[in-house]
Amino acid sequence: MHLVPADRADRRTIDGHRVCDAIAAIGDPGHVRTWSDRFALLADPNRLSLLLALHRTGPLAVSDLAIATGMNDPAVSQALRLLRAAGVVAGEKEGRVVRYSVVDAEVRGLLQQVS
Amino acid sequence: MHLVPADRADRRTIDGHRVCDAIAAIGDPGHVRTWSDRFALLADPNRLSLLLALHRTGPLAVSDLAIATGMNDPAVSQALRLLRAAGVVAGEKEGRVVRYSVVDAEVRGLLQQVS
DNA sequence: TGCATAGCTGCACACCTGCGCAGGTATGGA
DNA sequence: TCCATACCTGCGCAGGTGTGCAGCTATGCA
């Protein structure tokens, strides 16, 4: 199996076959990017706090999230906008109040690992 | 249980008791930071590619990692230095060649979730 | 000894990101 | 109608981050 792209086929390898295994292990670059983007969303302490709160206590309003995390409203709003754009959380409007929840299964799996 | 810190006790809440639940759900800020730092290490496509290659095919040399990922040597070196400083990978020297592996159990758990 | 290779480091640059501030929209009550 | 509340948005700044380049160290072989 020749998995090494042509543009780097001339470079010396230490263990040629393991390079092919590694390329197969990495898989589709788009897939890798999807996951690195997912991890990036959890890589901020404030966002992670928001997600943990939502994941473990269920739907919460923006103001309550602000108080619980110590952030101020716009910061929470902006964080939630990012997470919403990524399809990680979703908000349900109820009068003036919007309650958010975690809706992405993969992210829920990751949050589960945060013991 | 009064978990709301004094400096935000005066702010209006939507669901007072759920705020306390949320604060309990977030837990220790230091712990949250530890995890967000962990996620940050996986939040770069290149680093994630390196970790996936190492996790799924075992110990690999720096040059081979460079070929497999398409990065150039210094970039791989720097990424590995970061991961090494965080205790995520470790290198075993064998002559001129250094083979790296993933040694952090939590990170291995996360990599396992990248299906 | 001389040379090629494997890997590491420092630096400078462009780039991105989180945050606070000020102000805007929409809902509900007086 | 007027106002307070809940949430959202745009902007600008400070700080961090990835990357390429050039050069360094160390190992192994002829």
Image (cartoon, coloured by chain):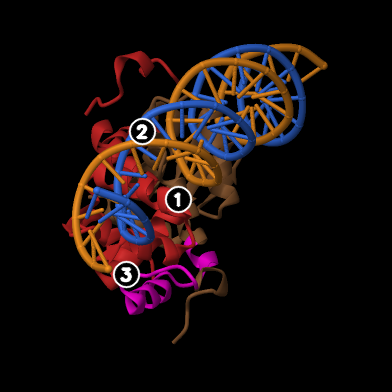
Chain colours: A brown, B red, C blue, D orange
Q: Secondary structure at mark 3?
A: loop
Q: Does residue A109 show up?
A: no
User: What residue is at 46 percent from the left and 55 percent from the top?
Assistant: B72
Observer-nearest residue: D18 or A54? D18
Q: Residues within 10 Å of mark 2 (few under 14, many from 20)?
A: many
Q: Is D10 situated above or below B52? A: above
User: What residue is at 22 percent from the left and 50 percent from the top?
Assistant: A115
Q: Amino acid at mark 2?
A: Val
Q: Which residues are magenta?
A: A10-32
Q: Residues within 10 Å of mark 3 (few under 14, many from 20)?
A: some
Chain for numbered disc 2: B
Residue corresponding to mark 3: A14
Residue corresponding to mark 1: B44
Q: Residues within 10 Å of mark 1 (few under 14, many from 20)?
A: some
**From the viewer's perspective, is D3 left or right of B73?**
right
Rendered image: mark on residue B19: 2
